[in-house]
Amino acid sequence: MSRIGNKPIALPQGVKVTVKDLLMHVEGPKGKLEQSFDPMIDVKVEGNIISLSRKNESKQAKSFHGLYRNLLANMIIGVTQGFTRSLIINGVGYKAELKGEQLIMSLGYSTDFIVMIPKDLKVAVEPNGKLVISGVEKQRVGQLACEIRSLRGPEPYKGKGIRYEEEKIRRKVGKSGVK
């Protein structure tokens, strides 16, 4: 039994959810999202409560039950509050600047990296080396943050590179010289 899938989802004020032709549409103050779902799952909107159920007890249906419940809950959070992910740029000469829809980053290589920012996401560059990525769709925010972090991952000796704000880097002790 899926414990997550059985939890009902409460609809906040100002959010509209419609289910039609295996497609969930969620509309709220911050935007619109849609997600297709498998025919093994039934989605029922009754007043301010959304409940999901599965049509059979197969392993696939049980997996989809919790998955689509979480996807729908994340869509509702996205159109009401939005999602953010913060990155910290650490290193001498490492910097990022925003020019239009491009994020230009100097990360210790001979050339700068240029990252195109999608239309549905916002990136803010703060002066202390912090990047804040925000958007409505959780997966897209996380994907862009992951792509930016992969340009120069944090290294364990000096801690240089790009890391998530909540990430802890385990530092290593360098070699001790021969005496």
Image (spheres, grey):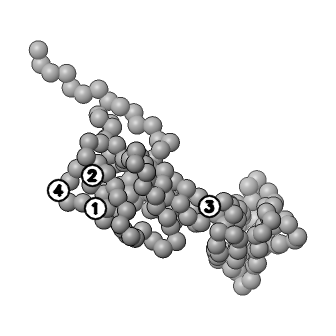
Image disc number at residue 107: 2
Q: Earlier in the sequence, mark 1 or mark 3?
A: 3
Cβ–Cβ under 8 Å for marks 1 and 3: no
Distance from Cα at disc 3 to Cα at disc 4: 36 Å
Q: Earlier in the sequence, mark 3 or mark 4?
A: 3
| Rendered image quadrant of residue 43 | bottom right
Label 1 sits on what residue type? Phe
Distance from Cα at disc 3 to Cα at disc 2: 29 Å
* Structural crowding at the residue carrying mark 1, measured as other residues with C-alpha within 10 Å and reported as few (<14), some (14–19) or many (≥20): some
In this orientation, which residue lies closer to the viewer: 43 or 16? 16
Label 4 sits on what residue type? Ser
Image disc number at residue 113: 1
Image disc number at residue 43: none
Residue corresponding to mark 4:
110
The answer to whether residue 178 is left or right of residue 40 is left
| Rendered image quadrant of residue 22 | bottom right
Q: Earlier in the sequence, mark 2 or mark 1?
A: 2
Residue corresponding to mark 3:
82
Cβ–Cβ under 8 Å for marks 2 and 1: yes
- Percent from the top left, x then y, of residue 45? 83, 72
Q: Is residue 20 visible?
A: yes
